[in-house]
Amino acid sequence: MSGIRMRAMASVVIAVAVALASCGEKKTEKPVVKRYEAPASLDRELNSIELDSLKQMKRTHHVTRDEYWDGYGGVMANDAFEVWYPDGKVNVLQGMAMLKVADQARARAQEVFGTVPSERAVIICAGDIDVYAATTGRQWWHYSRIIGDTISIQPPTMLATRGLFFIVGPREYYEWTIGKLSKGHASRWVEEGFASYLAGEAAVLEDLRQDIKADPLAMSTKAMESALEKEKDRQTTRQAYYNAYRMVEEIIKAHGIEAMALFVLKLGENADADAASRAAFGAGFDEVVEAGRGWSATPN
């Protein structure tokens, strides 16, 4: 692994651009985002209890790589995942915890789809939210950024304090998996909604629904897809997340989770959504989508 990639994946970074000239006359400085520096409480040797827990989890999850570099962070990996965590020796526990929940999600995906991607997923855990924002270009209300086989994720400690750690880690893996198995042919609402469903995100989405001012709450499929592609406005994006979840939930109620999984797999064989829908649900895609929109007629 090159030093450049190591630094990027350990979320170590970043000095963002210094100054821009305005019309060749006035210069304004952008804020500089310094690299994450671990608090002293995290940059210590592990105690005996922490070490014992770590050893147990490493055995259970078949860890094949465990490295750490002072000032950079470390990596914890097995055959399926490579998890990078930030500076601070105790943060190895964050890396191990993320590897554990990802492994559990992979086992669940194997049950649902009957297969999982053969590629190794790289998960990068940021040290703090400023570094996360600077390296991904995303805001605090975005859980992650997925590019190729790399999932850049918010600081695990922040996710834990928000009650999201055991939802977000699996959810982002499911989203990546759906994208891989469908070969990118699944609509964004299918990816987001099915990933949320598999991660058990319903209660979180119901909490976030209180932040949505839109009336009516239901969106057209076109508007939902557009909002999920852009992910620019927080309320509109959350409204689209909610709609996607409820659509998938309604389809699964009618056809079962096996059919939803088969739809994803059929999309991986053929980009024709209508053909995949007929093979999985026994009905055309437009018909299935229209039935899925029936959730909005149900009192919430």
Image (spheres, helix red, strand yellow):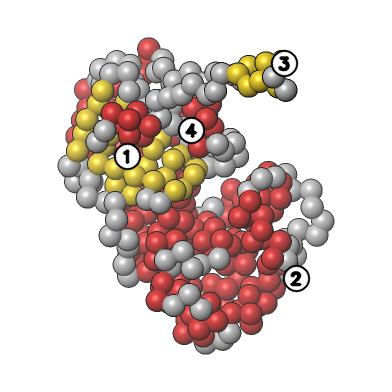
Circle 1: residue type: Val
Of the residues tagged 2 and 1, which is closer to the observer? 1
Circle 3: residue type: Glu
Q: Which mark is residue 297?
A: 2
Q: Label 4 vs label 1: CA separation?
A: 16 Å
For label 2, count other residues whose C-alpha is less than 10 Å away and answer few (under 14), some (14-19) or many (20+): few
Circle 4: residue type: Thr
Image x and y of residue 233, in percent? 70, 45
Residue bearing the label numbered 4:
135
* Disc 3 element: loop
Image x and y of residue 35, in percent? 44, 20
Q: Which mark is residue 27?
A: none
- Name the residue nearer the viewer: 170 or 18: 18
Residue bearing the label numbered 3:
25
Of pointers 4 and 3, the one earlier in the residue sequence: 3
Image x and y of residue 240, in percent? 66, 56
Residue at 66 percent across and 20 percent down: it is 21
Image x and y of residue 219, in percent? 73, 62
User: Are dots 4 and 2 in contact, CB under 8 Å?
Assistant: no
Residue bearing the label numbered 1:
83
Q: Label 1 vs label 3: CA separation?
A: 46 Å
Q: Label 2 vs label 1: CA separation?
A: 43 Å
Image height of 82 relative to 183, above or below: above
